Image (cartoon, grey):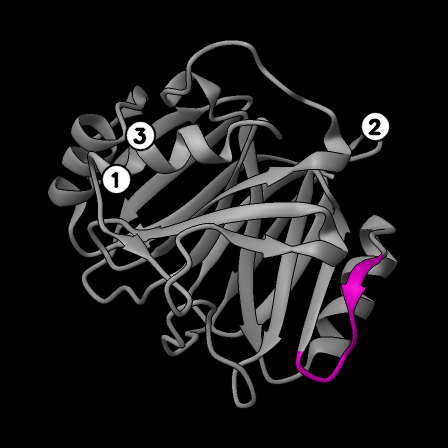
Amino acid sequence: MQLEELKIHTANLTDQKLFYTEILRLEIIAESGNAVSFKVGKSVLKFEYRDAATPYHFAITIPANKEKEALSWLKERVDILKNDSNSIQEFKNWNAKAIYFYDADQNIVEFIARNNLKNDADEVFDQNLLLELSEIGLPTTNIKKEFELLNKITNMEVYDGNFERFCAIGTENGLIICIDKNLKNWFPTQDKAYSSDFSLLAKVERATFRIEYKNEVLKAERI
């Protein structure tokens, strides 16, 4: 699965615009009075204003050999969210390493280097090596129900996990991270996981789907 465009909400549109342009140096590709869209490699990240917005977790893929350079680059710009004393988190069963930080909304943003993708780069790390959006968190109270809907409409499969606490649905290029919000908080901070509304355009094989999560109801349709 590829995450082509992710729309999330913010109550601080001006602050988020400044963060993503001045701190992460992302390019604005569309802007209106209540929304702004950024280019994130092959993906688009859109923030839309809402006066009551709750935090999200999402991830951005970086080249598999660049986690140390990415850490140095981020340390000049943000505070790193650590687990114990570790700034880089290793996920051996995913053959991946990740770095976490907050944006201006206290969204937990993750840079993840996935060795299985074999996407090493020679260039010095900067914002141009943010390859694509690759995860969006979906806190719920019924992981199995969310999976069955996605599987029925899009043919997505479980990548890792189960229906109890944590289930990653999709592929290494793009995952919907379902957690039971009554049993699990967000890693690595243990922040409360909110069922924040989002809209996603995703490509599964050769088909494109619109996936929406609104008021804790998940919908998906082929477009």
Residue 208 pos. (x, y %): 73, 34
Q: Residue at x 47, y 26 (%)?
A: 130
Q: Which mark is residue 206?
A: 2
Distance of label 1 from label 2 (alpha carbons): 38 Å
Point out the stretch of residues depicted in magenta.
158-165
Distance of label 3 from label 1 (alpha carbons): 6 Å
Q: Closest to the observer: 148 or 94? A: 94
Kindly identify the amino acid type of the residue bearing the numbered disc 3. Answer: Trp
Q: Of circles 1 and 2, which is in front?
A: 1
Residue 143 pos. (x, y %): 70, 77
Q: Are marks 3 and 1 in contact (CB under 8 Å)?
A: yes
Q: Which residue is mark 3?
A: 73
Q: Residue at x 43, y 67 (%)?
A: 188
Residue 29 pos. (x, y %): 34, 18
Residue 169 sits in which quadrant? bottom right
Q: Residue at x 65, y 46 (%)?
A: 96
